[in-house]
């Protein structure tokens, strides 16, 4: 049976023909129409017609993949040394039986966010990570924790309590994201364009941000707008704390921790 080529397919292939300056004949158009009917929107992933579609396909399902690629293109993954005249802030994701991840960053001129270090490990207590941070010899500003930084252990002690005893700085514990994490993911997207990453110290963290993706549904053949929980999740969750923390710091214009939290609550209410 002959395949009838739709107007949409013809219009699309006409544009590709003009851009590539290559003739697409009737047989090729029928083949594309047949694949389009079988694959639907996934056809550009399986059969990209140009580099732009290949780029889009490579980043399909990734939350930050396209933005990290643009940061690379602009030279934003490079040497970002510690500036001893600026405070270092940290952002955490706490893992009890899985990874704890920490980003270290400084706020630069013109709203630039300088990501100078990343660290992760698992199966260790709070003081272990504080020792690593103290070994960096940074001058600390704010330590930004998720809500579970205030969860009590069997000894009725919290991670924040343990850190405060050995790690200087001010402590911000962010509220639980009662509406889900997607507002926070959008805040990350709004911050990433301002970020530069130290290529050496943040290599593993950058890989995690690039790999953070949506959950794939084999039965439906599509992505859910739900993050896949895997080895990339913890660093990405910590970076979400970083972005939300910066939002509060900037809205409170360098004010108190209480003003940071008020600004964050206003934003997410």
Image (cartoon, rainbow, N blue to C red):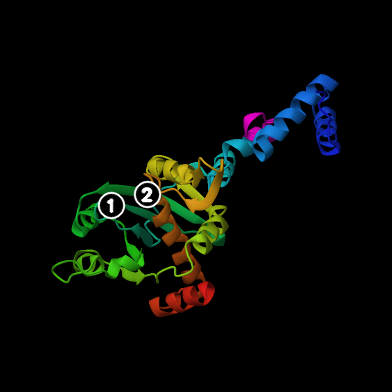
What residue sits right under mark 2 in the picture?
Answer: 117
Q: Is residue 249 left or right of 222 when viewed as pictured?
A: left
State which region is magenta.
Answer: 44-54
Q: Secondary structure at mark 1?
A: loop
- Measuring from the top left, give residue 45's x and y in whole percent: 63, 34
- Measuring from the top left, give residue 192's x and y in whole percent: 53, 53
What residue sits right under mark 1 in the picture?
Answer: 136
* Near-viewer residue (60 or 235): 60
Q: Residue furthest left?
A: 155
The answer to whether residue 23 is seen in the rendering is: no
| Residue 51, quarter of picture | top right
* Near-viewer residue (67 or 44): 44
The answer to whether residue 90 is seen in the rendering is: yes
Q: Is residue 132 left or right of 216 when viewed as pictured?
A: left
Label 1: how many Cα within 10 Å (few below 14, some 14–19, many 20+) = few
Closest to the camera, between mark 2 and mark 1, is: 2
- State the predominant SS element of the stretch in magenta: helix
Q: Secondary structure at mark 2?
A: strand
Label 2: how many Cα within 10 Å (few below 14, some 14–19, many 20+) = many
Q: Residue at x 42, y 44 (%)?
A: 208
């Amino acid at each position: 049976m002959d395949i009838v080529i739709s107007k949409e397919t013809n219009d699309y292939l006409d544009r590709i023909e003009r851009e590539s300056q290559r003739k697409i004949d009737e047989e090729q158009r029928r083949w594309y129409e047949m694949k389009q009917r079988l694959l639907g929107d996934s056809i550009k992933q399986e059969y990209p017609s140009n580099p732009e579609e290949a780029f889009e396909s490579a980043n399909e399902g990734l939350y930050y993949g396209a933005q990290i690629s643009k940061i690379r293109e602009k030279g934003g993954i490079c040497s970002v040394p510690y500036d001893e005249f600026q405070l270092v802030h940290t952002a955490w994701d706490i893992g009890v039986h899985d990874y704890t991840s920490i980003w270290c960053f400084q706020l630069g001129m013109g709203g630039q966010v300088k990501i100078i270090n990343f660290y992760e490990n698992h199966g260790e207590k709070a003081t272990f990570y504080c020792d690593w941070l103290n070994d960096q010899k940074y001058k600390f500003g704010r330590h930004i924790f998720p809500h579970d930084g205030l969860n009590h252990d069997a000894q009725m002690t919290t991670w924040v309590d343990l850190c405060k005893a050995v790690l200087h700085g001010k402590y911000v514990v962010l509220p639980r994201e009662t509406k889900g994490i997607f507002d926070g993911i959008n805040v990350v997207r709004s911050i990433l364009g301002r970020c530069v990453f130290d290529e050496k110290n943040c290599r593993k963290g950058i890989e995690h941000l690039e790999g953070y993706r949506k959950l794939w549904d084999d039965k439906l053949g599509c992505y859910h707008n739900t993050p896949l929980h895997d080895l990339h999740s913890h660093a990405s969750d910590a970076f979400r704390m970083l972005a939300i923390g910066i939002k509060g710091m900037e809205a409170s214009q360098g004010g108190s921790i209480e003003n940071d939290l008020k600004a964050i609550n206003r934003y997410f209410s």
